[in-house]
Image (tube, grey):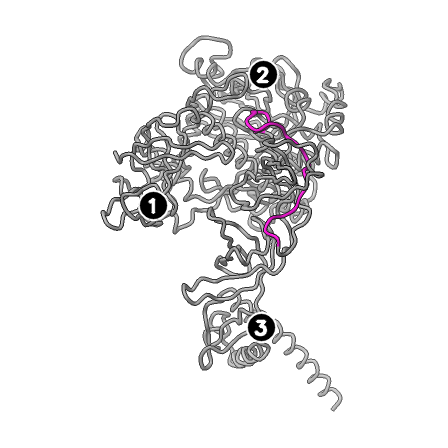
Amino acid sequence: MKSKKKTKKKNSSGTGVKKKKLRNQVFDLFKSNPTRSYNYKQVSSMLKVKNKQKRKLVMDVLGELERSKHLKEVKKGKYQVNLKSSNVQGRVEFTAKGTGYLVSEDIDQEVFIANRNLNHALPGDKVKVRLYAQHKNKLLEGEVLQILERAKTRFVGTVSVSSSFAFLVTSSKSVPYDIFIPLKKLKGAQNGQKAVARITDWPQKVNNPFGEILEVLGDSGNNEVEMHAILAEYDLPYAFSESVEQAAEKIPEQIPDEEYKKRKDFRKVPTFTIDPADAKDFDDALSIRKLKDGKWEVGIHIADVTHYVKPDTILDQEAYDRGTSVYLVDRVVPMLPERLSNGVCSLRPEEDKLCFSAVFTLDDQARVHDQWFGRTVIRSDKRFDYQQAQDLIDGKEGPLQQEMLTLDELAHKLRNERFKAGSIAFERVEVKFLLDELGSPTGVYFKEHGRSNQLIEEFMLLANRKVAEYIGNVPRDKTPKTFVYRIHDKPDSDKLETFADFVQKFGYSINMKNNRTITSSINELLEKVEGRKEQNVVETLAIRSMAKAEYSTKNIGHYGLAFDYYTHFTSPIRRYPDMMVHRLLARYLEGGSSANQKKYENMCQATSDMEKLAEDAERASIKYKQVEFLQNQEGEEFDGIISGVMEWGVFVELNDTKCEGLVHIRDLDDDFYVYDERNYCIIGQSNGKKYQLGDPVRVKLVRTDLEKKQIDFLMLDKR
């Protein structure tokens, strides 16, 4: 009898655990589909419950959830989540009109949040939201109950001072509030100056937050001030602290004798760098020599930054916090102090330099026969800019011409093989501004991507791919060691189909049969549109249909490059993930154990986030210069192409300068226009007139606003 009682108790406890787990699974299912209703059979099917006894348990759980008010019975035997009791967490984002919506992992759809229900939440804030259904349009709506974490605490804007109070008029279009600043907290800021402020208080029934000035940047319109304001807007630093600079100054340039003995010596092998004409940090060099068997030894030599920047030092923490160098329209804000980036680590000619190298033995067809990774010492013979290298490739005589021509030939073969394997040829036109001594734009030019650029690109890709393969491509019965990959997911199928439908209107097609046919037909399309009026629009949309490349320890390959394994090894002076890769590769070459995967995944996420901020800041600086370049041309007419379509208007990119501005839908007064999202157009309801992405148009410049970085056009004619 005693043993029976014990058994019964044990079974009862086990059933309780199972029931609790099932209850959580059932409620999670309803929360993820808050507007849907299900009966016990549907729930069982979706949870893959086939056992009769467990299905009965599903019925019991549904009853319990209904009695506890977590679910409501909407029809006999059909249940729906009781949204009044359902709170979810997520991040608030704002539309261009200033309305909010919640993005949450707890539910598979966006939640609309009306202005009255934002309760002082700002873009990016982590919040707790109460859900409720709006039956009228079946949108899921919510109300912010609590702000769990502010995304931003510092805001950039222009100070507006009156006799008794002041405001910081914020620069960001996505922050629809000005910050009230008491006069005693202005920190010397004058009317019209750019400044950085923080919110100190925001009483519940007050429209505007209260704040204080943290830093006065200077007078609006001054180039230095405006660039610093853009960096501050994205929480990016524009200077190094004194302690960081001092740490960099302590690093000696001279290489100790014992360090030479630890490394392979490439100082007598023909070696050179190829970089932009205005570059100061040279983090990669190429060497080449012919071997006795007729093959080529090609060395890709990368500045050994991690030899100088040790983990857990102030320099390493600063580099990690920055994540990347930031390339604004008129400057580079380096990840490392200039002492390192332009001096100690930079592979300047006629100087011994420490490198981490990937060395390959290639035949004349650029097939890899052997490879070696390790630490080296090099001495670059010459520094080329891209045009100088191109001149040698085009036949102009000069030092190292034969080496340059051989590398160009090998690179060309590597490139052809890459495209045969399905790599996509994204090479967008790069617009650059000519600037005067004050940083004001005086002209625009387009940066060309010639064979000298391709030469460097192909060997950098080779090194990045082979390093990733070396660590990640292990036998199936072995687990790869933790590593940092540069991953690029397959395109979103819906976006790709929409893109394929759009290009059909221009007479092009995308073969959607499989990944190989998709990439080959996209390449064919990009080749066909080159030089045509629709080139930039088609290239932009092709890129938008793709996923965003990022860093991760979880390798899924790189779709755009058609590589199963890919990493970033070649730019440690300007990218922190490359430093992570150098450290991991060195560890494993020395026989070290696998690094902590969770730690490195968190670092990958952080550096991916910093990369996006840097890109956003770069775009903002370009937009500022576009507005500045056009501000004295108001009233003039231009030819352009429709580069974007939104419900509030169409964006037009000017043919001559690639500057982009908006034609507001309210200014199209010949009809009432309706937005057709799927077909990238707006259509007049009465006359049927259509303005579609890619259409050539003529516009008149009517307004420029430097503060908001906005250009407004008036539509004159459809070409």
Pointers 1 and 2 in contact (C-beta within 8 Å): no
Instruction: Let me know if residue 504 appears in the view.
Output: no
Rendering coords of residue 677 (x, y %): 35, 49
Rendering coords of residue 331 (x, y %): 56, 24
Residue hosting label 3: 22
Rendering coords of residue 171 (x, y %): 55, 38
Dot placed on the residue nearer the N-terminal end, 1 or 3: 3
Q: Amino acid at mark 1?
A: Tyr
Local secondary structure at mark 1: loop
Judge left or right: residue 5 versus residue 652. Answer: right
**Spatial separation of the CA atoms under disc 2 and disc 3:** 67 Å
**Spatial separation of the CA atoms under disc 1 and disc 3:** 45 Å
For disc 1, the neighbor class at 10 Å (few under 14, some 14 to 19, many from 20) is many
Judge left or right: residue 279 versus residue 517. Answer: right
Residue hosting label 1: 680
Dot placed on the residue nearer the N-terminal end, 1 or 2: 2
Q: Nearer the viewer, mark 1 or mark 2?
A: 1
Residue shown at 75% from the left, 20% from the top? 252
* Residue farthest left in this picture: 687
Instruction: Let me know if residue 554 appears in the view.
Output: yes
